[in-house]
Amino acid sequence: MTYPTPDDITAAATRIASHVRRTPILTVEGAALGLPYPVTLKLEHTQVTGSFKVRGAFNTMLEAGVPDAGVVAASGGNHGAAVAYAATQLGHAAVIFVPRAIANAEKLRRMEMFGATVILTDGAVADCMAAYAAHAEQTGALSVHPYDTFPTLAGQGTVAAEIEAQMGGLDTILVATGGGGLIGGVAAWFGARARVISVETEGTNTLERSLRAGPEMSVQASGIAASSLGGPRLGVMSYAVARDHVDQAIVLPDQAVFDAAKRLWEGTRLIGEPGAAVALAALTSGAYRPAPGERVCVLICGGNAAVDWFLG
């Protein structure tokens, strides 16, 4: 299976540069997070739509071109907001299909705010994916897949290129995984040059189960991170990258995610959505323990959630 190379990701970075933010990094002293070592955070939740997804959305539309029928996507929220924003900025209509079972009020609001027509679907995530694919076929709209296409992975990989340039090199990056577009792009960029660690919750462990049982299995997403990481199965291309370049797959309980989000807020006054806190939770829970001197980056991938979701 062919997947993006660093050259493809570099080309994508040039293509989307004028449409996305170069988000900052922040190195936090360990004590602020209750850890014995410092951690560098990539603040991708400050991206223009509040998540990394806009990188792949712009790269897909700019590379493929958009027909008069506009674009269509399926999403739990972040991808939909990204597609809506990118389409609107480029002058196109966007329709987003969202599974009612995992619909998040804040993410629905942001999709509509960025210009999308939102259609809620009943049933499982797979039913939503089928409805969106049928719409694309019937109308001729450009299908912008949330994670399993070459331009999506190349676009998401641009965040890894930024991180490496900003940090001047690193040993390990922790990435929350849903359908695999983000970790696929990150792993395609780094290859063997850095350790890439996937982090999921017990209710969204798509990558961990795929690596054990093969890519044909599917997960019925549940729990606190379902709207962020609720891909029913890993993308075929993402699976190929993960098989080759993901070093470890960590699975955590929801409580570890709540704790990580609280530590992030108390230590930095930053708020990430549940999917973003998942990656940090690998450290705060002790599931991943860096070696002395190991240069670690945590990708804070999104911030589209109610500001008090982790309190109580």
Image: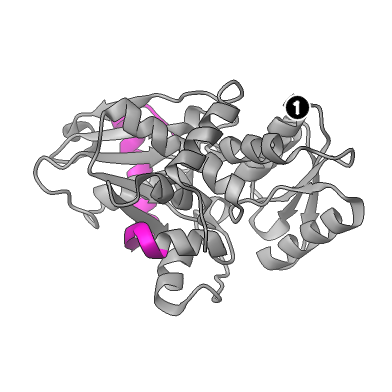
Instruction: Give the side of residue 305 with respect to residue 117, left or right.
Output: left
- Graded by Cα atoms within 10 Å as few (under 14), some (14 to 19) or many (20 or more), the crowding at tag 1 reads some
The image quadrant that residue 41 belongs to is: top left
Q: Amino acid at mark 1?
A: Leu
Residue occupying the point 67% across, 60% down = 101
Q: From what the image shows, is residue 37 above or below residue 132?
A: above
Q: From what the image shows, is residue 190 above or below residue 208?
A: above
The secondary structure type at the circle numbered 1 is helix
Q: Where residue 12 appears, x then y in whole percent? A: 55, 35
Instruction: Give the side of residue 35 with respect to residue 143, left or right.
Output: left
Instruction: Give the side of residue 137 with respect to residue 22, left or right.
Output: right
Asked if residue 230 shows in the view, the reply is yes
**Residue bearing mark 1:** 90
Residue occupying the point 62% across, 37% down = 59
Q: Where residue 108 appears, x then y in whole percent? A: 70, 42
Residue occupying the point 78% across, 56% down = 132
The image quadrant that residue 159 belongs to is: top left
Does the magenta-highlighted stretch encompass residue 229? Answer: no
Question: Which residues make up the magenta segment?
Answer: 243-271
